[in-house]
Image (tube, rainbow, N blue to C red):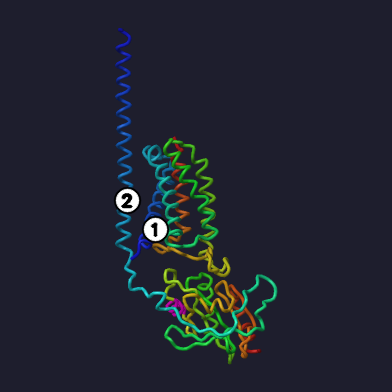
Amino acid sequence: MATQNPNARAEARRQEKEAKRRAEAKRQRLIYGGVGLLVLLIIVVVAVATVGESDDRIRLSEVAGDPQIEGEPLPAIPESGEDPAVGSPAPVIEGADFEGNPIQVGDSAQVVSFVAHWCPACDAELPEVVAWQDAGGPPEGVDLVMVSTNMDDSRQNWPPQQWLADAGYSGEVLVDDLNASAFQAYGLQATPSWVVIDDDGEVLFRQSGLLDPGQFDELGALAADS
Amino acid sequence: MTVIAIAERVFGLLSVVAIAVAVATAIALVRGRVPQWLRDDVALPLATAIAATATGGSLLLSEVAGYLPCTLCWYQRIAMYPLVVILGVAAVRGDREVWRTAVPLSAIGALVSIWHILLEQNPAWGGPCDDAAPCTIIWVEELGFLTLPTMALTAFVAISVLSLAARTR
C-alpha cells in the first residue's frame, strides 16, 4: 500500500496533465479555426463590396446580329491536304455592323477575318490587322471585312465593338448571330479564320489560325488578282 | 452582381492571402525558425484547406459557371485533387512526412501552371481558338494578374511550403 499511493498520485497527476494538454490543444484549434473563419468572412465581405453591379452591361442579345445567309454551306477546313471549298461559291451573307449599317460578305473581292472578342489569338492578331489597315490594307477593289462571331457577354473584351474600337480598327464589321450562323456557313471551327473571296464570289482561300504579318498582303493580292 | 463574380473575387483575395502565407512560411523555413504553432497545429490543416478550396473552386467554375476546363487545367486538377485527401489524412494523423508525397505532386502541378500562364501571356503559342476550350483563354482575371493558372500556382507553392514547414523539428 505504501508504494501504491505515490503511484496512484503520479498517475492522477499524469492524467490531469494530459487532460490540461488536451483542453489547451482544443482551445488552440478553436482559436485557429476562428481566425480562419474570420479571415474568410472578411474576404467575402470585401468581395461583395468590391464586385460592381453588372446590370447595366450590354447583353449578348442586344449586340448579336441577324444575318441572312444564301447558298450552300462550305465543308469544314481539312486538317491537311487541299481545301475542298476552294473554287466553290461562297455563301452570301447579308447582315449589318454594330450600328445597323448593311454589310455584305461573299459576293465581291474580299479578305474576310472571322474573330471572337474573347479569343486570345484574335486579340494578339488584331493589332497586326490594324497596322496593315493603317498601311493601306488590301489593294484597290478588295475589301477587308471582319465578322464578329462566337460572341459571349460573360467573356473577356466584351462588348466586341469596344474591343475593336480600342484596338483602332475602323473597317467594316459584320455581326454574326447568336448561333454563329455565318461562321458555320463558312465551315469554320476556330478563330481567327481567314477567307479570301474573288470578284465572282468564289472561295480562293481559307485558313484558321494566326497569319504572319507578310501574309496579309499576299491575301489581298490573291483577291485582287482573281 | 452575380454569385460567380463574387466567388471569383473571393478566390482572388484568398490567393493573395495564400501568397502572403507562402512567402512568410518560406522566410521562416529559410531562417530555420518555423514557429511551433505553425509546425504542429496550423501547417497541415491550412494546406488541406488550400487544396480543398482549389478543388471546390475549380469544380464551381466548371460545373456551375460553365467555364470549360482546357487540357492543361485537367493536368493541374490531376495534381491538386488527390492533395485534399493526402493532406487531410496527414493533418488528422499528424503525419509530418507527408511532404514526400505533397511536394512532388505540387511541383508537377506548379510546372503545368507555369506553362499555362506562359500560354496565356503568349496566345500565339497556342494556335487558333477552337470553341471547346483553348488553353490560351483567360476566363478569370482578378486584381489585374490573378488568372486561374496563377491561382493554381499560388496554391501549389503554398501547399509545398506548408508541407515542408510541418516537417521541421
> Where does the image place residue B103, in percent across and percent down from the top left?
51, 45
Q: Element under label 1? A: helix
Q: Give the magenta-colored segment's residue range.
A: A160-167
Does A38 appear in magenta? Answer: no
Question: Toward the viewer: A191 or B132?
Answer: B132
Residue occupying image coordinates x 49% and y 85%: A95
> Where does the image place residue A47, in percent across and percent down from the top left?
33, 59
Name the residue furthest top: A2
> Where does the image place residue B121, in percent across and percent down from the top left?
51, 65
Instruction: Give the class, few, some or many, for how many residues have Cα within 10 Å of label 1's Cα (few <14, many ≥20).
Output: many
- On the picture, is A114 further left or further right than A8? right
Residue occupying image coordinates x 45% and y 58%: B63
Residue occupying image coordinates x 30% and y 13%: A6
The residue to which callout 2 is attached is A39
**Mark identifier at residue B12:** 1
Residue occupying image coordinates x 57% and y 70%: B128
